Image: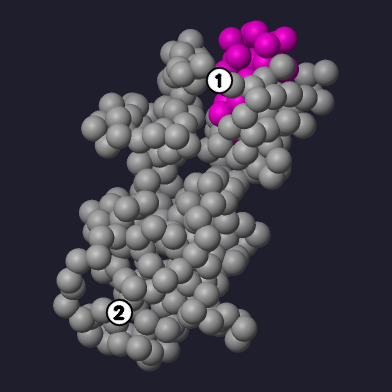
Amino acid sequence: MQNNQGGRGERRPDRASNGGGGQQRPRRDNRSAPHRSGPQRARPVQPRTDGDDPRHSGPPIPPEIEAKQLSPEIRGELTTLDRATADAVARHLVAAGELLEDDPEAALEHARAARARSGRIAAVREAVGIAAYQCGDWAQALAELRAARRMGSRSPLLALIADCERGVGRPERAIELARSDEAAALTGEDADELRIVVAGARSDLGQHEQALAVLSTPTLDPAQTGQTAARLFYAYADTLLALDRRDEALQWFLNAAKADVDGVTDAEERITELS
């Protein structure tokens, strides 16, 4: 599956966290099982259903991967499973996290193997959704991320969900989500991530002036660096280019390249094209 989601400037989608327990911002951050997870509420112990069933064994897990590499918060969610199943789920999630950036298809297989054993755990459904998102499978990602949110995930999933709505051809729905109370409560990079998505949705509809207004409110600070800043500047530059404001676009691609210390965009290539 290819990631063809436009307007992001990313080499791959990203916005989540790694299975090893370290929360990164997009480069969406080597993404897999999120560092943050659903509320700690009492759940009945889940019966061991298919943990030993070879039909659900999933891809082989490298022997060096251990369950303890998963973040403690997510491991806490797995206590509703018997020990052997919890260990298998944890190791699949860690494997998914390690593979996510370089081999998202393999990461998705590991995440699905975890889901086959523990489909009622928010962090697991979120991991499947993020891996599917990385693969550009917008429909599957949307279904899984919605499920994770219903199950109580605390991760900021709204921007991802809105971007999936764009991916399945519903930019109007992405814009509608941005008007929700949940969107209004977002701050910092989470709010910026949603701005990028909403601007992309506006551009999908040919509304480039509105997209530019979304990206420029609040005013952009070209001195900022980091993954989210780089993508925000890139989206701004791309929108300026769509409005035939070439010189301004070039300057913001330069700003994006300067901010992009992790190489999450192709800003350098766009600069070469415009120079």
Q: Eyeballing the image, is 34 above or below 57?
A: above
Q: Eyeballing the image, is 72 above or below 177?
A: below
Residue beneath label 2, please? Answer: 79
What percent of the width, then of the height, locates residue 142?
36, 48
Q: Looking at the picture, tell me which residue is in the foreground, 14 or 51.
A: 14
Q: Earlier in the sequence, mark 1 or mark 2?
A: 2
Which mark identifies residue 163? none
Question: Is residue 105 among the parts visible in the rendering?
Answer: no
Badge 1: residue crowd in 10 Å (few <14, some 14–19, many ≥20): few
The question of residue 49 being in magenta is answered with: no
Q: Eyeballing the image, is 74 above or below 11?
A: below
The question of residue 247 being in magenta is answered with: yes
Kindly report the secondary structure that dominates the magenta region of the rendered protein. Answer: helix
Q: Residue at x 43, y 38 (%)?
A: 190
What percent of the width, then of the height, locates residue 151?
24, 59
Q: Residue at x 69, y 24 (%)?
A: 255
| The magenta segment | 231-250
Q: Eyeballing the image, is 235 above or below 169?
A: above
Q: CA distance from mark 1 to mark 2?
A: 44 Å
Q: Looking at the picture, tell me which residue is in the foreground, 139 or 148.
A: 148
Identified by mark 1, the residue type is Leu
What percent of the width, then of the height, locates residue 139?
38, 49
Q: Are marks 1 and 2 in contact (CB under 8 Å)?
A: no
Query: What secondary structure is marked by label 2?
Result: helix
Residue beneath label 1, please? Answer: 220
